Amino acid sequence: MNKTEIFAHRGQGHGSTNGLDPTGGAYVGYAENSIPALLTAALQGFHLEWDVLASGDRPDPAAIVAHGDANDEGILDNEDLALVAGDTPLRDLQRFGLVAHSPGQTHLPPLLDWVLDALVGKDVRLNIELKGAGSAFAVTRCLQRRGTAGAGWDPRIIFSSFKPNELEAARKAFPEADLALLLWSGAPLVTGARMEQFIARNRVTALHVDIPLAHEGMLEWAATLGCAVRVYTVNDPIMAIGLVHRGVTGLFTDFPQVIASALQ
């Protein structure tokens, strides 16, 4: 069981359960998608997942590490920060100053450059979720400036997205990259020839699915496609054990230490 990949969802402990871990104890974490949250998880040996939005700067959008659809209209929705990123230049986004991500937590959303600088030399996978329109382009510009392309490719990186066009853009820019298609049970699921052609054409290596989709049929279909299956967001230790026995490759969780202990 201990070979299961455990990804810290937006870093170590972003407080999405109001400070209580799944076992009922007090839990102190960092603001989600913040450098302290991500670096803490990496230092503990957990793989990382974070979200990237593109700012509204043209022709060179900034890659911002933050959650929320680029077209959201509010600054704070029911559970996540929702930046009006896609139409807003970085200099204006930064005027928001410290913005709330979690109960009692504030921080300035970092740039992707800052996060990657903090994680140099950390031997963990880096799952970058391409959230909004244009996020793949913003990430591409950032990584190309850093020399992370071609011979300089960083094999730790995984690109994931619900948006097929963003994955296609990432594949075009980075032929070496691992790509993961995100699937959600609340949306119509297309598993026919068109989806399989997309997966084959873009050499998608994994399906990232929510818990209801992590059934035997999904695992069998993924196997025929040559795709790993990782499941989000798994905070219940008993659920985690069951999913691992079912044969999933990895788990995304808000509480990596709790889940890792359960799987020992």
Image (cartoon, grey):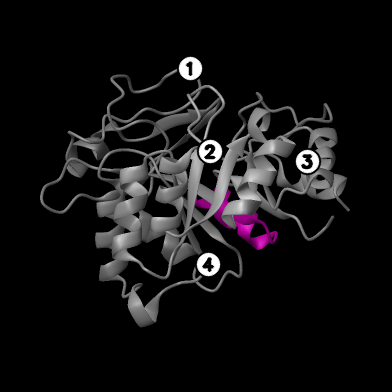
> What residue do we see at 44% from left, 29% from top?
100
The earlier-in-sequence mark between 3 and 4 is 4
The alpha-carbon separation of the residues under discs 2 and 4 comes to 23 Å
Q: Which mark is residue 78?
A: 1
> What residue do we see at 37% from left, 82% from top?
151
Residue type (three-letter) at the residue carrying disc 3: Leu
Residue 93 within the segment the image draws in magenta = no
Res. 12 in view:
no
The alpha-carbon separation of the residues under discs 1 and 3 comes to 28 Å
The earlier-in-sequence mark between 2 and 3 is 2
- Residue under pointer 2: 31
Residue 204 left/right relative to 136: right
Residue type (three-letter) at the residue carrying disc 1: Asn
> Mark 1, residues whose alpha carbon is within 10 Å: few (<14), some, or many (≥20)?
few
The earlier-in-sequence mark between 2 and 4 is 2
Nearer to us: label 1 or label 3: 3
Residue 13 left/right relative to 64: right
Nearer to us: label 1 or label 2: 1
Res. 120 in view:
yes
**Of helix, strand and loop, which one carries label 1?**
loop
